[in-house]
Image: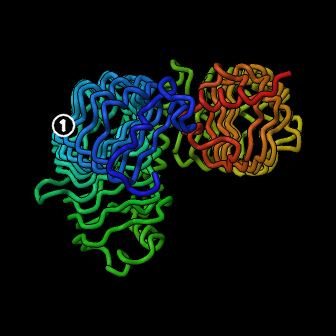
Amino acid sequence: MGDATADVPNEVYKNFDEAGEGDKWWEAVDLQKLILAHNNIEKLKEDLRNLPLLTVLNVSHNKLSELPAAIGELHMLKSLDVSFNSIMKIPDEIGSATALVKFDCSSNQLKELPSSLGRCLNLSDFKASNNCITSLPEDLADCSKMSKLDVEGNKLTVLSNNLIASWTMLTELIASKNLLNGMPETIGSLSRLIRLDLHQNRILSIPSSISGCCSLAEFYMGLYSQPNNALSALPAELGKLSKLGTLDLHSNQLKEYCVEACQLRLSVLDLSNNSLSGLPPEIGKMTTLRKLLLTGNPLRTLRSSLVNGPTPALLKYLRSRLPENEDSEASTTKEDLITMATRLSVTSKELSLEGMNLSAIPSEIWEAGEITKLDLSRNSIQELPPELSSCASLQTLILSRNKIKDWPDAILTSLSSLSCLKLDNNPLRQVPSDGFKDIPMLQILDLSYNIASLPENPPFSSLPHLQELYLRRMQLREAPTDILRLQQLRILDLSQNSLQSIPEGFKNLTSLTELDLSDNNISALPPELGLLEPSLQALRLDGNPLRSIRRTILDRGTKAVLKYLKDKIPEN
């Protein structure tokens, strides 16, 4: 608004109907966006009701001490930013602004939030950090679309079980720097949660239900507020969070790091300033760790040069402390496990030998009879024995994360009933150009992370029943043209490749519900992609240099992007 001002010019509040002929143009348009940020505005008038078409109102970084009740009359308002003011109370009328999707009232002087906010059923991004709020109104449970919540830096003592259980769409929950004395037991219902930040609170334990947060990638629990208000132990269930990459537990009172949590595939683990006197040697197996922070622990068994040195050297040392006979012990239990698993498969027809460190496929498998599902993922298998051909009733074959170099065409010839084949994360050299001809009934195929293994024109048209196709990180420079013939395809994942464009023909994939194009080099999308609405529910585009679609549209999600593209289709 140019020079900082204490008042909003009256002309701003005039809408189209009131503007006379001789008035300036900005007085003669129906205002939809009003940005008044970074001024010295002390008051917003009730005349705000004269702007009924307002969708965005930003009055952040001003000197407001209150908001007008007329805010509730802005029925089109989707985004409201009143952060960095001196507001003491949000008016109850806010509950009538029912179109509200994004609301930022952070950095004010609020002690409470109005219950009426629960009537804003579309609210999905709510920020109320750095206030003096002591509790969240239970009515917020009705905001079932809540996906991002930031209440950092308040005086909350509890996050209620009911609220957390109601926000199943939550992807980000930030409640750090509060007075929380526990985590809600219902935290496990947040299966979409990606980031959980509860650092600097008074939380004494993590509930075992945390295992339900299966999408969690970042978890911050460091820096307790006061002595004797800190974590002293971790639940074994923490080890089930398979997508967790960052775990920050610094400045607590942990006496040990549980062995189960050594199954995590973390990049960063911060255990600094705890009460650890030793570490389980199994941490040495956490080879994905880039950073393991251990300073400030009374570690008696590790030299300080190791603790403060590079992480790989520390991990290598810890691995060397693993019992030497572990392999032989494992092999006896391994055989027991294989026997048990094959016994079970007689009734269930399913056999899982996942993650058993197998370098070859045991003969029990083809002796087990009519199995329909075989999971051999996360082993070190290099080749498939010809005897596997006898498992003719096999419908699902999972070989993910092994060391298979050659396409198993000799085996596939006999597995004509196969409907699911997962060969992702193998060092596959090359899929033969007729590699799919023997498995025409296939519905699910995953070849992800097999870099440069596809032939020039992969023959996906040999798989007319294919419903799910995963081709993540395969160094693809263009989308294989044969994909366009897969009329039943529902899920297509082409993420982490080097695609520069998407063929217009994708508009014919009318069964598609999920399309992942994230982390490519796509700068523009064909408008025809918009014709896939409403069947296409999830279109993932992040990590692309998309210049043709504004960030604001991308942020509004799949439906908004598809509508935008559809509107761009040139009319005949």
Badge 1: residue crowd in 10 Å (few <14, some 14–19, many ≥20): some
Residue 432 shows in the view: yes
- The image quarter containing residue 157 is top left
Q: Residue 358 in the image: x percent, y percent?
A: 57, 47
Q: Residue 206 in the image: x percent, y percent?
A: 25, 44
Q: Tell me if residue 377 comes above or below residue 53 in the rendering.
A: below
> Foreground residue, 429 or 159?
159
> Foreground residue, 524 or 490?
524
Image point (32%, 21%), residue name:
119
Residue designated by label 1: 112
Q: Tell me if residue 502 comes above or below residue 94 in the rendering.
A: below
Image point (76%, 46%), residue name:
499
Q: Which colour scheme is used?
A: rainbow
Q: Is residue 470 left or right of residue 436?
A: left
Q: Tell me if residue 428 comes above or below residue 466 in the rendering.
A: below
> Foreground residue, 460 or 24?
24
Q: Tell me if residue 476 comes above or below residue 75 in the rendering.
A: below
Q: In this view, does 516 lie to the left or right of 297?
A: right
Q: Residue 318 in the image: x percent, y percent?
A: 40, 67
Q: Residue 341 in the image: x percent, y percent?
A: 49, 31
Type of amino acid under label 1: Glu
Residue 438 shows in the view: no
